Amino acid sequence: MANQKKKEVGRRKFLKLGSMGVAAVATTEAVKRIQAAEKVITAKKRMAVVIDLRRCYGCHACAVSCKSENGVNLGAFRSWVNQIEIGKYPNFMRYFLPRQCNHCEQPACIKVCPTGATYKRKDGVVLINKDRCIGCRYCITACPYDARSFVWYRRSKGWQTQQRYESLDFPARRYGVVDKCDLCIHRIDKGLVPACVNTCPAEARIIGDLKDPNNDVTKIVSTQAVSVLYPDANTKPNVFYLGLHIDAAEKAVEVGPAMHPISSNR
């Protein structure tokens, strides 16, 4: 009887220590991921986007081409355009604000991902490993730019089937995972520009390497008055705007990926 009691106590102690060990390992891994996300990646490239709002007239060609190129599900967007109305009739203005993932230097999404599915390439492009994503959506909550969406539907059924006009180079969207802009890496890795940049009729979008002093993006960022969305988030976004209206930007960040006109009395 005494021996059996000792065995039970020993077993409980073993299980307790084992659970503590697992928790410690999990905590250590989480800390490592956070530390890795906070490190500045020294690379030869740092991809960035400049959007000239003085040229944009809200045609939504960027949003349409993005959905077509990447097979984005209905009801979700990787790229969209906010329409913000400032003032009251007859004294009001409408502003157009193209939005997407900001591919931040210090992404909040990477810090909260429990599996390491969200990561950053050496050129600064933030990506999602769909094989590791468990659909917890922590990253959606953490992103201050509302740049992520959850894929609820399987595209292989009914109206979710990939259409003929959609890119054949990019696989149909998986479901049960998070999705977002990846700067069309299947294009930029071939020396092409993203679909949104290629399609913009006003040439309001420019993509380039901030590490290249002769690049147009570098010249604009270093010599002109550029702005970023939500600078207080301290994520150091790599999407820069020319001609950004502060009130319009605040309203756009507040409402997220809304395609309909947004009114503000400011």
Image (tube, rainbow, N blue to C red):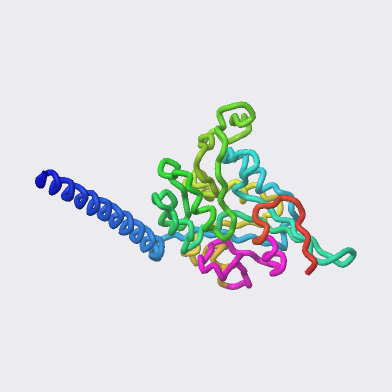
Asked if residue 128 is positioned above or below residue 40 in the image, the reply reads above
Give the residues drawn in magenta, as a range. 223-252
Quadrant in the picture for residue 36: bottom left
Residue 181: x %, y % from top left:
55, 49
Quarter of the figure with the C terminus: bottom right
* Outermost right residue: 90
Q: Is residue 180 left or right of residue 128?
A: right
Q: Is residue 204 left or right of residue 169?
A: right
Say whether residue 259 is magenta. no
Quarter of the figure with the N terminus: top left
Say whether residue 237 is magenta. yes
Q: Is residue 138 left or right of residue 49?
A: left
Residue 263: x %, y % from top left:
78, 60
Name the residue located 77 percent from the left edge and 64 percent from the top edge. 264
* Residue nearer the viewer, 16 or 108: 16
* Outermost front residue: 1
* Residue nearer the viewer, 113 or 203: 113
Name the residue located 44 percent from the left edge and 44 percent from the top edge. 134
Asked if residue 74 is positioned above or below residue 161 in the image, the reply reads below
Residue 11: x %, y % from top left:
18, 47
Asked if residue 7 is positioned above or below residue 159 in the image, the reply reads below
* Residue nearer the viewer, 69 or 13: 13
Asked if residue 205 is positioned above or below residue 245 in the image, the reply reads above
Residue 151: x %, y % from top left:
55, 41
- How many numbered marks are there? 0
* Outermost left residue: 3
